Every structure is written in C-alpha cells, then in structure tokens.
Image (cartoon, rainbow, N blue to C red):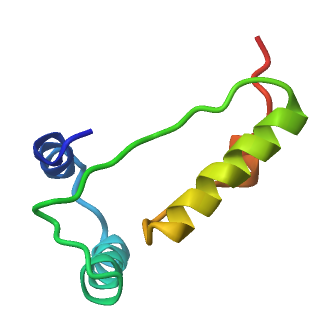
Amino acid sequence: MDNEQFKFGQTLRPTPSYFGLLLDGLKRIYITTIKGFDVDRMCVTTLLFEGKPKLLKKVSHEVVDFTLQTEQVTEISATDLQPNQV
C-alpha cells in the first residue's frame, strides 16, 4: 500500500476511545520519534504465508530477519504462522 492509500485508510478508521487515542499517540511517538519514520513517506505491506508448516516458519523468519537488517518495523504473531485450512 503506498503512502496516499495508507493515509486515506487512517482517515477511515473509526473514532477510538480515550484509551485508544492514548495508545494511538504512543504508537505515533514510537514510529516517528524513536524509529525515525516520516509519516509522509511510509508505506505498508501485508504478507500471507501459505504452505507446509516447516516452510512457513523458515520463510517467515527470513522475512523478519530481512526487516530487522533494514531497520523496518515488523509484526508477526503465532497465528500468522499457522497453515491455511482450505
């Protein structure tokens, strides 16, 4: 998702609660101040890993290693590594 689509998507988000506003503010401080990202140049990607569990684990770890080497932000949860049940 390019930057324009990312910013447009952010404007369509529902209005958060007070706690949500606080959490969003902390996220923004982390991304802009600590990580040093420019919100006018950010883009987003979502990856879906499909296949055998052993391969899923290997490939997802390679992606995480790459993002760590390039100082990007990554988020992978354990449920993301479960094979698709089709």
Up the image or down, 68 lies above or below 47; here it is below
As drawn, is 44 to the left or to the right of 10? right
Furthest-bottom residue in view?
34
Task: Provide residue 11's location: percent of width, then percent of height.
Answer: 13, 50
**Going 53% across and 69% down the picture, which residue do you hit?**
69
- Residue 75 visible in rendering: no
Task: Provide residue 20's location: percent of width, then percent of height.
Answer: 35, 71
Number of dots carrying numbers: 0
User: Which corner quadrant of the image does residue 45 belong to?
Assistant: top left
**Going 32% across and 76% down the picture, which residue do you hit?**
31
Furthest-right residue in view?
54
As drawn, is 46 to the left or to the right of 38? right
Which residue occupies the foreground of this view, 4 or 71? 71
Task: Provide residue 62's location: percent of width, then percent of height.
Answer: 67, 51
Which residue occupies the foreground of this view, 66 or 19? 66
Which residue occupies the foreground of this view, 81 or 18? 81
Query: Which image quarter is the C terminus in?
Result: top right
Up the image or down, 47 lies above or below 67; here it is above
Task: Provide residue 71's location: percent of width, then percent of height.
Answer: 44, 72
